[in-house]
Amino acid sequence: MSSLTHKQEIPEGGYRTPDGRIIGGVLMDLKHITLRFGGVVAIKDISFDIREGEIRAIIGPNGAGKSSMLNVISGFYVPQEGEIWFRGQKRPPLKPYQVARQGVARTFQNIALFKGMTTLDNIMTGRVTKMKSNMLEQAIWWGKAEREESEHREKVEEIIDFLEIQAIRKTPVGRLPYGLQKRVELGRALAAEPDLLLLDEPMAGMNVEEKEDMSRFILDVNDEYGTTIALIEHDMGVVMDLSDRVVVMDYGKKIGDGTPDEVRNNQAVIDAYLGVVHE
Amino acid sequence: MPIWGLSMSDTFFFALEAALNGLMAGVMYSLVALGFVLIYKASGIFNYAQGVMALFAALTLVGIQNGQIPFAHVINATFGTHLSTFGWTLPSFLAILLTLGVMVLFAILVERLVLRHLVNQEPIILFMATIGLAFFLEGFGDLMWGSEIKKLDVGLPQGISETIESLTEKWFGYGFFIDRLDIIAALVAAALVISLSLFSKYTKQGRALRAVADDHQAALSVGISLRFIWVLVWSIAGFVALVAGIMWGTKSGVQFSLSLIALKALPVLMLGGFTSIPGAIVGGLIIGVGEKLFEFFVGPLVGGATENWFAYVLALVFLVFRPQGLFGEKIIERV
């Protein structure tokens, strides 16, 4: 704490990005994570940190263990070894819904929306952790419950505006095209006002235009709400433009970690992505 | 043999009366079907024990109201005592509230002892578990409250409504016979359906419930505890079972056959669709009216007693032509 210097307001462990944003201290620290499924080692002794306010990418070829990593962070998988530190505290093994209540929201690679519900209801459901009125008040729709509902509606409308999805507010999400579904899912995650937002391949299966839109939203979320974002992506080009720092995984191991430029010039990364040329 | 030899207008009024009574009976079927739909929607489990839950709720209600000591005859047989009652009679409202507490406790135990250990199992396994649950609860209810037929009286009006009879007599020249209990049941069912749909639309828990029904993973990721939702769903199903138990118990006494009303709920579900609350209501009404009218018009030709099988045949027809029911979700596999 004491090392806050006067000349610059960069906190300990933080840094200034090329475009002038200030990245804060460590928000989440993953130490020596190992995850096994039976005999298969999905993640092998991986350590990295995520700092406040940054966009952190995890990349790697198919089957590298990226999604497993994200599932570890969001509590869907519990690693056999290693520690997860969140906001300076060691996190005990938690259930996914408990992790969510700590302020970690996520999206899924293969879209997990509530298909029968409208866009509005989906995003509203994202605010479950923010709703404080109890069961009885809810059941008889009294006092706090009613006040709360309108407060949350306001916040939800704000998100809908932000993501430019006003036109589909009342549409059941099962009927929406893929790109829009992805956007609604992002909206639901944002509704929780998370400290850490996890995006599992936010641009998978999108066309160029949709990818550009999504990139813009990710940057805007980070910029306007100051949300820390950790994302997994397949598409190298997109990731390099978006993120502040990149972790590269291959076969469950970390083979690179650094700024996009550092990673781009890392021989192990080039080999993993392009394959080693056999003469 | 009613229709033969009657005038046109008499036939019309008889049929109308049969249809009205059918509507009322249908509401009673719907009440039971509703419990099935709630659990099926939220967890994909077909809860075979729903009928027995209605029986158990009714037994518990009678027991609590009359101050019966639970397990009295087990204790008596073991220790040679002569316990029977606490000697009080509770007001209906209080007894219903206490019974509701018991049903919530039951929901918590089901989650703790059964569901929690069967997470991610095939639906058929969960179904088998509920069959086991049904047998257990049936025996447990007997053990706890005794197996004799009991009279349930929570102060609901019963018997033919004379007001309706005299009014219709005056208007149409034909007095309709309609049971007052049936009218109450219809009103209660309507209130139940409306409040359940408001609850699921506009409250946090209701939304969470629909969320869990749609996607477990996504529900977890927004911070919804599946266990809590399961307890909630089973509690609500217990509440619906209690309402059904009160209505059926008042009508025909609290006895084992009460649990068999679950069988009547099956064709209702096939008609209405397993996942639709309005479907359960409409399905119940169609079956109620259908079986009364069928008995009235076709019954005499085939020697009567068509009410025993009409519902099931109708359900079979639906299975052939519209397997998802009237309101159910169409099962489409995208390839």
Image: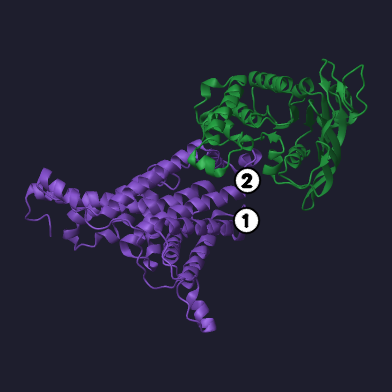
- Residue A55 locus on image (x, y percent): 78, 26
Colour mode of the rendering = by chain
Give chain B's shade: purple
Q: Position of residue B127 (x, y in %)?
A: 52, 58
Residue drawn 62% across and 39% down? Answer: B218
Residue placed most toward the observer, B227 or A38: B227
User: Residue, x 91% and y 24% (percent of image)?
Assistant: A4
Answer with left or right where residue B145 lies relative to residue A125.
left
- Viewport quadrant of the C terminus of chain A: top right
Q: Which chain is green?
A: A
Circle 2 marks a residue in which chain?
Answer: B
Q: Nearer the viewer, residue A145 or B124?
A: A145
Q: Which residue is mark 1?
A: B116
Residue B213: which disc? none
Report x, y in % for residue B133: 52, 63
Relative to B192, does residue A142 appear above or below in the rendering?
Answer: above
Identify the amino acid type marked 1: Arg
**Mark 1 surroundings within 10 Å by alpha-carbon count, few (fewer than 14), some (14 through 19), many (20 or more):** some
For residue B214, side relative to residue B153 (left or right): right
Q: Which mark is residue B225?
A: 2
Residue B328 visible in rendering: no
